[in-house]
Amino acid sequence: MDHGSQPLGVGHSKMVERSAQLLMNPIKFGEPGFDKVFVAGRISREGSHWRLDVMDDYPVVALNDAIRQEFGLVNCPTVKELRDQEVGELSLISGGSFLWIRQGGSSKLLLLKRDLSAPTDAGLMTGPAGRCDKTMSATIREETNEELVILKSVRSNNRVRYKSLGFCWGGKSGDDVIDFKLQQADRKAKDLLEKGQYFARALLQAIKGAEDVELVSLKPVDSAVQSDSVSFYVNGVEVDRVDNCLAYFDAENNTLEVRQIFQIDFAKGEDLRYACDGEFFGREVVLLNSLDEVPEALAVPALKNYKRKAVSVARLE
C-alpha cells in the first residue's frame, strides 16, 4: 500500500521506534507513517501453532532507507535488511487473505496480479496482504478491505443496485468499514477518471452513502487446509490469536506469511459486477475457477503454499 506520508513529529517518531509500541498503538490510516513502518518479531513453532514474540527492545522496520531518514528512525532496520537477515533472529510478519466468491453453484478465487515494478514478486499473483504494523487479526481484516474493491449487483423489483462489499468480523460494528469503503470508492472513481476508465468510474460513483455499502461478516472456510494457528505475544503476554489459518515461513524473504481463506456467498439475483485493486498500483484482478489454474511460476510464496497444502490434504481424503 502507499497512501502518502508527511514528516513525523518528534513525539510520533519516538512512539514508533519500537515494535511493541507500534503493535499496541498502530498508526492509523491517513496518519503520517501509515504503512511505512512495520513490526519485527521472533518466530517459533510447535506443531501447527506459530508464536510471534515482540519485546520492548525490538526495533520497528522502515519501508526503505528514505523512510528511515525521513522519520528519524536511524537505529531501525529497513525491510531489505530484514529480508537479508541482517538483524539477528528477527523476521518480518505478513497477514492477508484469499477470497472465494460463490454464486450460482460455482466459486471464483479473486487474486491480484502484482505490478511489474514491484520490488519483490513482480508480475506474480497474490491475495490481499501486507506486512504487519498491527496485530495479525487486524492486519488480515484491514488488508482485505484496503486492497480489494468488490461491487455486486442486486436485482429487486426490476431495478439493479450496486453495493460495495465491506468486510468485518470479531464483533466490530462496521461503521469504520463503511466510512472507509465510501472514501475508497471516491478515491478510486477519481483515479479511474484520470485513466480514462469511464465505465468503471460510473459504477463506483454509484457508491454514495452508507446504504450503498454492504457489510459482510467474514468467517474462515472450515477446511483442513487452514489447520494452523498464530499468536502474537508482547513481552511474554498474548495479545492476539488467529485460529483456522494457513501459515508459511518464506525463508528466502525472512517473512512469516499468514493467510485466512474466506468464502462470500451471493444470493439469487446477486452477481459480481466489478472488482479492482483497492489502491493505486493498477494491479489486475484475476478470477480463477480453481487452484489448479494457478501456475506455480506465477504465484507468490503464500499462494504456492496454499495450492500445495490443498493438494496434500486432497490426497489424504
Image (cartoon, rainbow, N blue to C red):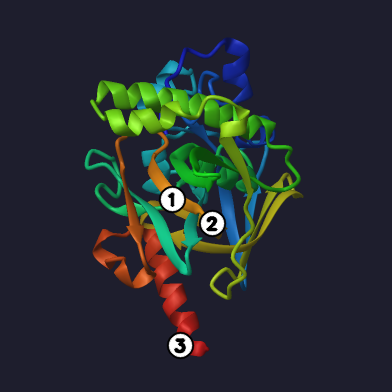
Q: Position of residue 258 (x, y in %)?
A: 53, 56
Q: Which residue is mark 1?
A: 272
Dot in front, 2 or 3: 2
Mark 2 or mark 3, which has the lower sequence index?
A: 2
Counting other residues with Cα less than 10 Å from the Cα at mark 1, is it few (<14), some (14-19), or many (20 or more)?
some
Residue 290 in the image, given as x and y percentages of width and height: 38, 69
CA separation, marks 2 and 1? 8 Å
Q: Residue at x 58, y 25 (%)?
A: 209
Asked if 263 appears above or below 149 in the picture, the reply is below
Note whether residue 213 is visible: yes
- Give the quarter of the image for residue 106: bottom left
Identified at 33% across, 73% down, the residue is 292
Q: Are marks 3 and 1 in contact (CB under 8 Å)?
A: no
Residue at mark 2? 266
Residue underneath mark 3? 315
Callout 1: helix, strand or loop?
Answer: strand
Q: Are marks 2 and 1 in contact (CB under 8 Å)?
A: yes
Say if residue 26 shows up in the picture.
no
Q: Which element carries disc 3, helix, strand or loop?
A: helix
Q: Which mark is residue 293?
A: none
- Helix, strand or loop under label 2: loop
Tell me: 97 left or right of 170.
Answer: left
Mark 2 → mark 3, Cα distance in angstroms? 30 Å
The three-letter amino acid code for the residue at tag 2 is Phe
Q: Is residue 93 above or below residue 309?
A: above
Tell me which label, 3 or 1, sits earlier in the chain. Answer: 1
Could you tell me the amino acid type at mark 1?
Leu
Residue name at image x 58 percent, y 76 percent: 224
Say few, some or many: other residues with alpha carbon within 10 Å of mark 2 (under 14 / 14 to 19 / 20 or more). some
Which marked residue is nearer to the observer: mark 3 or mark 1?
1
* Quadrant of the frame with the N terminus: top left
